[in-house]
Amino acid sequence: MADNNLQNFIAAAKGGMARVNRYTVGFGLPNLLQKDMFDLRAIELFCESITLPSINIATVPMRTFGEQREMPYDRNFENVTATFYVDTNMAVKSFFDAWVNTVINPNSRTTSYYEDYTTDLLITVLNVQDRKVYQVGLYEVYPKSVGQIQLDNNAKDIMKINVNFAYKYHISNQIDSGTNESSYTNSFRSNKLFSELNGEVPSDYYDGGNVFATSVPNEYTNSFTSYQERYVDRTAATNALERLQRQGIQTGVGSLYG
């Protein structure tokens, strides 16, 4: 039995194991940062390390009969931490300083609009042949904290900076060998990343079986109240039509449309 298990392990591992140093990072600029001010690609290349996001299920103890059980009621997404090398001109440090300052203005102490300082971030895991095998998209990302940098006359180490990213949620996708790799841009503000990674439209955006949105609408971020009202109206109208159709079939009168 032990020999069979060993052979099975060797057969399964023939394709190799994933390496922690095979990855790329890409993110779009938030609205309040001008594109021509920073070399975004260089900043992405200077990412020394980053954590793949975790997810926790929040539970509450419930008892119906006998022993209690933990019942899930929500999903919690923990922050992602990344470490960046800092270039000689301090452009990387300046970039994150500027980004943090868009969240809360350091002079007026006013808070900006949420959609203006958040963006989307994409982590891609590669194999040893540099082929994409796994991707994680983080949505509504912003730097919650930018770490301190220790300066030391007695050290000659490369300067690095730790950035802690907060975000709303993430989705992940394993890329099969037969799947055509999609080309991603550095701007995910349109939520194109969502549809490409997920491969389908979330059920929340179906209208009686007919898709009325192929991605998360911009209205969801820019004016959630308006979006929610429109969505509720559409849902109510769809449900009303379905009830009328069922009533017509049940009474033998026919459907709503004849």
Image: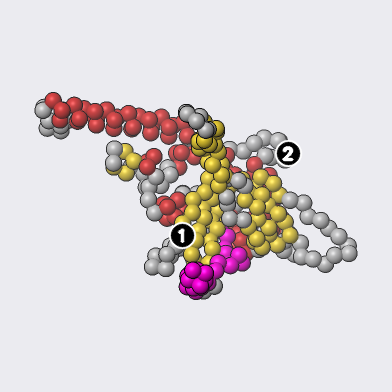
Colour pattern: secondary structure
Image coordinates for residue 77, horizontal then vertical, percent: 57, 44
Q: Do labels 2 and 1 touch, CB within 8 Å?
A: no
Q: Is residue 22 magenta?
A: yes
Q: Nearer the viewer, residue 33 or 47?
A: 47
Q: Secondary structure at mark 2?
A: loop
The residue that appears at 12% across and 30% down in the rendered structure is: 254
Q: Which mark is residue 174?
A: 1
- Residue under circle 2? 107
Image coordinates for residue 85, horizontal then vertical, percent: 70, 62
Q: Nearer the viewer, residue 116 or 253?
A: 253
Q: Is residue 234 left or right of residue 196?
A: left
The residue that appears at 50% across and 58% down in the rendered structure is: 135
Mark 1 crowd level (few <14, some 14–19, many ≥20, 10 Å Cα): some
Under mark 1, the amino acid is Gln
Q: Which residues are magenta?
A: 1-26
C-alpha gap between disc 2 and disc 1:
44 Å
Image coordinates for residue 231, horizontal then vertical, percent: 38, 33
Reply above or below: 253 against 176: above
Quadrant housing residue 248:
top left
Under mark 2, the amino acid is Asn
Reply above or below: 89 against 194: below
Q: Is residue 227 left or right of residue 94?
A: left
Image coordinates for residue 41, horizontal then vertical, percent: 59, 62
